[in-house]
Image (cartoon, rainbow, N blue to C red):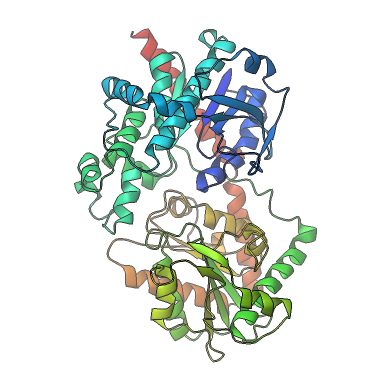
Amino acid sequence: MTENIVGVDLLIETSWEVCNKVGGIYTVLSTKAKTLHRLYKDKLIFIGPDVWSEDNPSPYFVESTSVLKAWKEKSEFPEGVSVRVGRWNIPGKPIAILVKFDGMYAVKDDFYGKMWNLYGVDSLHAYGDYDEACAFSHAAGIVIESLYAYYKGKDKTVVAHFDEWTTGMGLLYVKSVLPKVATIFTTHATSIGRSICGNGKPLYDYMKGYDGDQMAGELNMQSKHSLEKAAAHQADCFTTVSDITAVECEQLLAKKPDVVTPNGFESNFVPSKSKFQSVRKNARKCMLQVASSLTGNNYDDDTFIVATSGRCEYRNKGLDVFLDSMCRLLQLSPCKKVLAFVMVPAWCDTARADLQESLKNNATVRLADPVITHKIHNPDSDAVYGRIHSIGFDNGSDSNVSVIYVPCYLNGNDGIFNKDYYDLLIGMDATVFPSYYEPWGYTPLESVAFGVPTITTSLSGFGQWILNSFESNFESCGVTVIGRSDGNYCDVVENIARSIRFLVCCDKEVSGEISCSAMATASCASWDNFVKYYEDSFRIAILNEEKRNNNN
């Protein structure tokens, strides 16, 4: 696929995570960009927030004086709004515009009033990050308006794509001032659905009984929900990332998505075959050394390493299930030692000085509290830390299962591992992502890209894709999908523990076959295969824009 087959003259995508790595949407956009740029070249422009400074520059943005030079020289923006133009430092190197949006706060009340009158967006109950997101997306809308004028957009096919509720105000602004722009809105997870789950309420068994507006009032989510719902209804094309989230959108936002756009993948960060084994060996050596220096135990090369990772959402991400599964695995007497890592960033303080000293001296002396690698600010209230201790894991030398909590971002500079997450993932033998709320799920997809078998649940978008595309077992696709509902917690724990025990005890030949199957699955989820769903969304948006304007 090497050409623009939809006929888009200008494609603009706006997200809080453009050149700003704060969550999973960054992975979606930054990996998708290579394929989109191949199709649309510099007709593709990304817009993100300029939240950077000279002391803290974005490592993902390369400013340029030549890119869009004529537009920038002619552009005029309200006081307090400015732009920097360059390229996103990712494969494909697409054009990126970073927007400084401080000036939008001064006009927010008038703007909120206009959006209430036009689209019924209730900003009265706003709090937290609502104002910041709306100020950015309002400013982004003004930038799109300027680009539209510069490119003489009224004579061209222009598509403006907005990701998440955080850009909803930008979409509504563009629709109000640029009716000939075809708009797309993508929700990667509904704000009210995430809130229902985060508050410990059952989502799936009671889905048909929930009213999104009512729940927004109950959970104090009126403004975010109102904005997200308005953007979904007003967009020329509404999309989401998985079938399971499509059901959620239809019930809670009262709008069925026009297209499901599953999250594709670029595996360019996976080492080449010639380097793969050496990188894997180094990763395993690092993790085993940290474990030995922390616990005082000897973990030989045959130790089975399993991990979970992602956001520190104790229930939504299934961290509770993972820890209970490791407890059950211990009772099942695995065939060899198992080392389990919980790699989720929490309220981290600093790397443990005693562990740093132990690693420096290559010591294997048991340290105090040998279940955590970094200090945390809230040890008394951290759910993961508390559960590890309440289960009784103490990582003693007589235990076949050790659990270690890594409560920091693995960015290569954490003070203990000093490797990024991918450089450790390649050394694992399995991963587990037993999510309760997971609209897509990049972490299991990343895992299989490295040939690491993974376990996920039927409540994740990725898990649903596996169930629809493969036989759900390790031998067929490197993935086992555990059926999960609101009422089968204990069954999920049992099935995960037994699945891990199977991997621990299978021979090297079977392990090799499973690893190959995992990599083959990852290749099926490449953007080359999934970009077609985005092109469908472009077509739908353009068609609906034309219908909308022909009817006016």
Please indicate whether residue 84 sits to the left or right of residue 544 in the image.
right
Does residue 237 appear in this view? no
The quarter of the displayed image where residue 232 is located: top left
User: Split into 4 quadrants, where in the image is the C terminus?
Assistant: top left
Q: Is residue 97 above or below residue 508?
A: above
Residue 44 visible in this rendered orientation of the protein: yes
| Residue lying at the far right of the rendered structure | 274
Is residue 290 left or right of 377 when viewed as pictured?
A: right
Query: Which residue is drawn at the image coordinates 35% and 23% (left, top)?
Result: 111
Which quarter of the rendering shows the N terminus? top right
Q: In x, y percent, where is residue 109?
A: 33, 26
Left/right placement of residue 453 relative to residue 131 reads right
Q: Return the residue nearer the eye: 57 or 208.
A: 57
Residue 243 percent across, percent down from the top left: 39, 44
Front in this rendered view, residue 6 or 396: 396
- How many numbered callouts? 0
User: In this picture, is 448 found above or below 307?
Assistant: above
Quadrant assignment, res 228:
top left
Residue 43 quadrant = top right
Considering depth in this image, is 452 or 409 the residue closer to the camera? 409
Q: Residue at x 62, y 71 (%)?
A: 511
357 versus 96 height, above or below: below
* Residue 231, position as x, y percentages in the image: 36, 29
> Whole-percent x and y of residue 311?
47, 57
Query: Is residue 496 depicted above or below 20 in this figure?
Result: below
